[in-house]
Image (cartoon, rainbow, N blue to C red):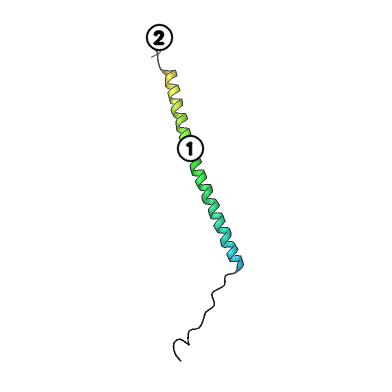
Amino acid sequence: MSSEELVVAIPPATVPESVLKKRKRDDQWSLSRKQKAEETKSKSAANRKGVFKRAEQFIKEYRQQVCFHEFDIPFFLQRGMK
């Protein structure tokens, strides 16, 4: 008996069809979750930029409204407001 004769061909392990289907389904789900996460991330980044722009615009408008002009100062002094 030589060593070549002792080699026995081992059949490849078979995987049940239900396991293969589950793997395929899980791969599809993970891909869809990644796509949704990317969409959400891009939307939130755009929304965040919009929020800061609106806040800056609000501050700008508020400062223009509150700004005391030269003609307002005598009015406030007359009323006792400082």
Count of numbered circles on the image = 2
C-alpha distance separating marks 2 and 1: 42 Å
- Name the kind of residue labelled 1 in the image: Ala
Q: Which residue is mark 2?
A: 71
The quadrant of the rendering that contains the C terminus is: top left
> Counting other residues with Cα less than 10 Å from the Cα at mark 2, is it few (<14), some (14-19), or many (20 or more)?
few
> Counting other residues with Cα less than 10 Å from the Cα at mark 1, is it few (<14), some (14-19), or many (20 or more)?
few
Please determine whether, in this image, residue 3 is positioned above or below residue 20.
Answer: below
Give the farthest residue toward the bottom. 1
Query: Would you identify the image quadrant in which residue 23 lies?
Result: bottom right
Instruction: From the top left corner, tell me how far across and down residue 27 is, in percent.
Output: 54, 58
Q: Which residue is mark 1?
A: 46
Q: Residue at x 58, y 65 (%)?
A: 20
- Name the kind of residue labelled 2 in the image: Phe
Query: Would you identify the image quadrant in which residue 71 lies?
Result: top left
Q: Residue at x 53, y 55 (%)?
A: 30
Instruction: From the top left corner, tell me how far across and down residue 24 is, in percent.
Output: 57, 60
Please determine whether, in this image, residue 18 is positioned above or below residue 5.
Answer: above
Q: Earlier in the sequence, mark 2 or mark 1?
A: 1
